[in-house]
Amino acid sequence: MDKLAGSGNDEFYTPFYAVEPILKYVRNDAKVLCPFDTEDSIFVKSLKEMGCDVSYSHVSDGKDFFNLDLTGYDYIISNPPYSLKCEVLEKLFKSGTPFAMLLGVVGLFESKKRFE
């Protein structure tokens, strides 16, 4: 069973006002992965409108972020499940690919591991 299967309380649909500030940092020809999104995501729609080559995945489609290959993308952009933010950030930092994740800052540095 994947880590995301039981995280129904983490589902939050990101509004455009939260996506818009990120878009100015993304090249129009970029290859972008949105690993916590469906085709109806504002991230996916906005990036496609800009001309980006967008791939997306979501646990509801049987895709587990922790089993995804994060190589070959210019950026990884999404709104991950907050209950797994430590694990998500760890995988993203290890990938070496630039990323932008919308995360609540409350508790972000509560553990020594996350602070480092």
Image (tube, helix red, strand yellow):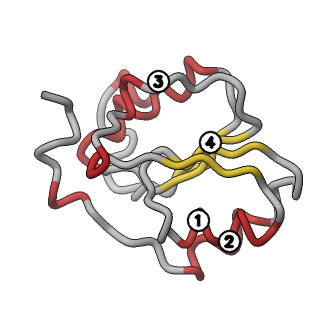
Q: Say what amino acid the circle numbered 1 marks.
A: Phe
In depth, the one of 89 and 31 nearer the eye is 31
Q: CA distance from mark 4 to mark 3?
A: 11 Å
Q: Residue at x 76, y 72 (%)?
A: 49
In depth, the one of 29 and 96 nearer the eye is 29
In depth, the one of 5 and 110 nearer the eye is 5
Are the residues flagged by discs 4 and 3 in contact, CB closer than 8 Å?
A: no
Label 4 SS: strand
Earlier-in-chain disc, 3 versus 2: 2
* Label 4 sits on residue: 76
* Label 1 sits on residue: 43
Query: Which of the 4 quarters of the picture holds residue 28?
Result: bottom right
Are the residues flagged by discs 3 and 2 in contact, CB closer than 8 Å?
A: no
Q: Residue at x 45, y 56 (%)?
A: 37
* Label 2 sits on residue: 46
Q: CA distance from mark 3 to mark 2?
A: 25 Å
Q: Is residue 88 above or below residue 76?
A: above
Q: Quadrant of the N terminus?
A: top left
Q: Say what amino acid the circle numbered 2 marks.
A: Ser
Tag shown at residue 91: 3
Earlier-in-chain disc, 4 versus 2: 2
Label 1 SS: helix
Q: Say what amino acid the circle numbered 3 marks.
A: Lys
